[in-house]
Every structure is written in C-alpha cells, then in structure tokens.
Amino acid sequence: MLTYTIRRLLLSIPTLIFIAFVIFMLLELAPGDPMASMPLSIPPEVRQQMREALGLGEPWWIRFPLWLNQFFIVEPQYWIDNAFGTNFADGAQRIISFQSRSPVFDVIAQRLPQTLWVVAMSYVVGVLIALPIGIISAYKQYSVFDQAGTFISMIGFSVPPFFSGVLLIVIFSVQLGWLPSIYDTTLVVNSWDTFTQQLQQMIMPVMVLALQTTAQVSRYMRASMLDNLSQDYVRTARAKGMSESVVVLKHVLRNSMIPVVTVIALGIPSIFGGAIITEQIFKVNGLGQLLIIALQGSDIPMVMTITFLLAVLIVMMNLIADVLYGILDPRIRYD
Amino acid sequence: MTDTSLEKEVVIEKPRNQWLDVWDQFRTHKGAVFGLGFLIFITLFATIGPWLWQVDPGRLDIRNKDLRPIYMALFDGDAKVSWANPMGTDNLGRDIMANIMQGGRISLAVGWTAMILAVFLGTLIGVLAGYFRRLDGILMRFTDLVLSLPLLPLLLVMMLLFRDPLRAAFGPENGIFILIVTGIGITSWMQTARIVRGDVMALKEREFVLAARSIGTPARRMITRHLLPNVLSPIMVSATLGLATAIITESALSFLGLGFPSDFPTWGKILFDSVDRMTAFPERVLWPGLAISLTVLAVNYIGDGLRDALDPRIRGL
C-alpha cells in the first residue's frame, strides 16, 4: 500500500506538470491582452515596455519553466520564511498579479477563508443529510420515503445552483425578509449577535451547495446499501439472531461506506467549481469571484494559479480516493 | 368440437421488434413518460411557438414596459397587466414569452448539438480504446488527464479568450454558438468514453465477435455492424445525461456573463439579466429558471426510464 501510494504520488508530478502546461498554453494561445484596458493614448513603445515589465516579453519556453520555478520553489520558500522567520527566498520574484500588482498567493490567502467556510460547511452539511437519507431509502426500498428521496435527489441534480440560489433569495430575502441576500465578509464574529448574523448569512449559500452534494451522495449511499443488503452475510447475521439495528448499522453500513467514502473524496473538487457560481449569486468575495474578476481583466498569472490549484486538488483527491479504497476494502490490492 | 377449442387457445404472438419491447417497458416508468411529454412540449413551445406567437422578441415597446404576468391581476387589481403580454414584459418592454421561446430555441439547440458532439467524441475514443489494444493505454491516460482538469474554470477561460476571434470569423451569433458547443463538447465526453470502452472490451471476448472475425470481417465493419449496436443502450443513457449537463453548463456560462451577447436571449441569459431586478419582478427570474430546471428534470427522468427499459434483465418483468 505504501509503495503504491508513493508510486502514485510520483506519477502525479508529471501529470500536474502536464496539466500546468495545458493551462499555460491555453492562456498563451489566447489573444486576450492585459494591456487592453490601458488608455489608448499610451504610445506603442511605452506599451511594449509595460508588456516587458509584466514579464510578457519572453517567449513561452522561458516563461513556463519560470512559472513552474516560482510556483513550486519560490512560493514555498516564502511560506517557510513567513512561518519560521528564515530567509530562503532571498527576495526572489514571486508570482505577481497583473491587476493588483501584489503576490498572487497573498490575494488567494485573503480570499480563501470565505470560500472554505462556505464550501466546507456545505459539504459537511450535505454529507450529513445525505447519509441517513441513503440508508433509510435503501432499507425501505420503494417506500414513500424512498420515492420522496429519489425525487429530491432528482431535483438536486436538475435545478442548477444559479436558479436554486436566486429562488431562495426571492423567497427568504425578498418575500419573507428573514435572511440577508448578500454575504457580508467583513463581519467579525466576536459576540452572540454577530454569531447569529454569520449563521443567517451562511444558511442560503450553504443550502444551495449542500443540495447538490446531498443529491449525489444519497444516491450512491442508497445503491451501495442495496448491494450489501442482499448479500449472504446479512442473512447470516440475521440468522444468528442479531438485532436489526446491529445488522444494518454495523454490518451493512460499514461495508456500504467503502465506495461512498471515495465518492465523497472525489466530490470535493466539484464543489469548489460549484462555488464559483454560488459566490457570484450571494456576492461572497471568495476564490470563485476572484477567478471571474481575474478572467475579465486578463490577469493571466492569477487565472493560471487558481486553475492550477484546482487541478492539484482534483489530482490529490483522486489519489486519496484510490488509496482510501485500498485501505478500507482489503479485497482490493494494488500491487 | 375439440379441435376448434384447441385452436382458440393457441395464440401466436406476433414477432415483436426490440424497440417495441423497450417502449413498453419505458411506458411503465411514470416519471419518464412525464419527462418525455414535457420535453416534447418544451421543444414544440420553442420551435413552433414563435410562429403562433408572432411577437418579435427584440421589439422595444417602452410604453408597455415592466408589465406583470397576467395572473397577477388575480391577486392585485392594480397590477399592470395586459393580455397582449401574458408573461409580462421586461424593463425595455420586450415580451417575455417571445423571449423565453427564442431563448429555448438557443438553449435546446446548444444542448443537443453539444451533447451529440460529446457523445460522438466519447464513443469514438471509447471504441478505439476498447477495440485496439495498442491505443488503449494512451487514450485512457488522455481521458484520465482531461478528467483531472478543472473543467468549469477552463471553460470560462476558453469563453473569454476565444470569443473575439470566433466572433470576427463567423459573426457574433454563430461564433459564440460554435465556441460554446465545442467548449461543452470537448469537456464532457469522458464518461461516455469510459463506459463504451468497458463495454466494448467485454463484447470483444464474446463468441459472436470471434465468429465474425473468423469469416474475415474487417475492423471497420466489425465496429459498425457488431459492436456499436450492442453498446447503443449505454450510449443512449449517457446521451440523456449529456443533454442535461450541456443545458445546465450553457446556462451557467450565460449566467456568469460569459455566454451569448446581451441582445441574444438564452434561458441562462434571461435569468442573468433579471437577477438585478428580482426584488420587484420575481417572475422574470422564475420563468427562465423553471424552463431550465423542468427541462433538465424531464431529461434526467427520461434517462432513468431509458436505463431501466434498455436493461434486458429488468425488461419483461
């Protein structure tokens, strides 16, 4: 298992570099010009100098390794320097945003907490709702509860977040006036009042994202429970005279969780993708909104870094899912 | 006497077509039948509707701007309504019903074309990888690689960066249409490819393939005559899922302001344009949102029903 994990980790390095290359070339081929928003009165030679100042003067085979160097070597050096007060980086050039002229990772660090709060919370809530629904749906197959669960998950698959979010705003903010429609990120939680305020503004974005997670995870949970409920060992357990709750919640549930855990791990990147839209609706100034702004401003280093970070997340979650599968299910051996 | 009674009992059923069986099984799935009904309705609404409802979706009628939908007259006698615009008008006086029809045309056209492209690519890559062992490794590596790309951000990047050259080359509408369809198509073929590859690999070991090969069937005919008809059912199921995701993705792009130009309505675009004034006119958000959600729901139910109907183990029970 350990050798498998190490092999996969090593394999993911060329994969990631290739993905970085694909994203880089896509941005490179594109005709978007970061100078487009500059005044037209700037003479061409000054414009050329400004382009060079942004690091656009060199050809791609020089800039791409430079970016890799900055991302994988210089940036971690700065983190270490910040954490331990050392001086590894020695003033090396960091990845700089075209728009804000500040290091890309500083901007991301400012935006990350908002996104993480909403995304992580919604994922936890979604999974916590999905698991019982899946278990009961499978145990009482074709019952009213099962039908309702199927219908709700169908809705979760079908109603896109930009409609469910807007619908929630219309109902709860406009008609009823219970919840704020805009997420206030400057709110500091230091008292009971601000805590309830934070809770109120988080309910809607969390629910919008959680609906999608719930739909997906509860389907998998149900299918996996159904597979296991018809197995011979379940009959044996019942024949031994074990109580129904022990049979279902101990024997069947544990075995059914194996594929579900991997699905949960694999779903994490896609919830970040969904957050792009949700942040736009509720005006959360998180990573998704940062990406959209960077895209509109042709801020190539920012777009590149955020997209690549998402790719890293996907590759890592795939790896974790595979390794978890091997650890949890002793029948699966990778070597 | 006995002869005649015997004759009565022997009822030979007519030989039945496989698709008739599938249809019979499909009909037992209530949700799927409703879904099919709704999909046909919304398709007719968008295609034939503009001929019956001859209002130009782009016509500005400033005097009749901000009309509420006709049912508002039931709750509120003072509401500004008009039978000439049953779904109301927007802030420039454009008829919302005509816009929803026109938007439906675009959204459905994008959905179908992108789905067909994605299914074509997925089937091609899946069959090639499953049938030719030499190609399997490289094609599946490639599929895994594409699967680990962050697709929504990349799609956004593509939209923003290739918009202007395509617009210049094919005109504003066709350029964006081509861009969106290709973008969605080349980012959603992977699941189909994986499923088709697995099925082709299993089929390749069956006797009928061996028999076909023993009489010298060339690879091309082997694929088109023997393998493709047998993997048709998983392809059809993934096609319905593909249609649903394509419609949602197009609307999401329009919603993020990176889809079609603003005077060119699609459901996502109408939704996006109405969000700013949803406090005063919630119905403007509701119409396109309901159209998207119900269409996707219908397509998902059809996929569910098709999956059951095409599975010979369930069919006939």
Image (cartoon, coloured by chain):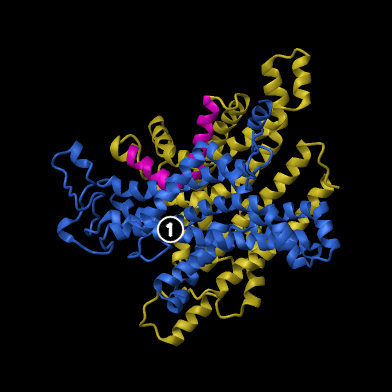
Q: Nearer the viewer, residue B122 or B8?
A: B8
Question: The residue under label 1 is which amino acid type?
Answer: Ser
Who's the residue at 21% across and 41% down the image?
Answer: B72
Who's the residue at 66% across and 18% down the image?
Answer: A245
Q: Which residue is mark 1?
A: B107
Q: Nearer the viewer, residue A44 or B237?
A: B237
Residue A199 position within the rendered picture, expressed as x and y whole percent measured from the top left? 43, 35
Residue B267 position within the rendered picture, expressed as x and y whole percent measured from the top left? 38, 55
Q: Which hue belongs to chain A?
A: yellow
Res A143 quadrant in image: top right
Res B13 quadrant in image: top right
Query: Which quadrant holds the N terminus of chain A?
Result: top right
Q: Identify the main secondary structure in magenta.
A: helix
From what the image shows, is residue B167 above or below residue A171? Answer: below
Q: Nearer the viewer, residue A173 or B118?
A: B118
Q: Is residue A134 magenta?
A: no
Q: Magenta stretch?
A: A144-171
Q: Which hue belongs to chain B?
A: blue
Q: Is residue A97 visible?
A: no
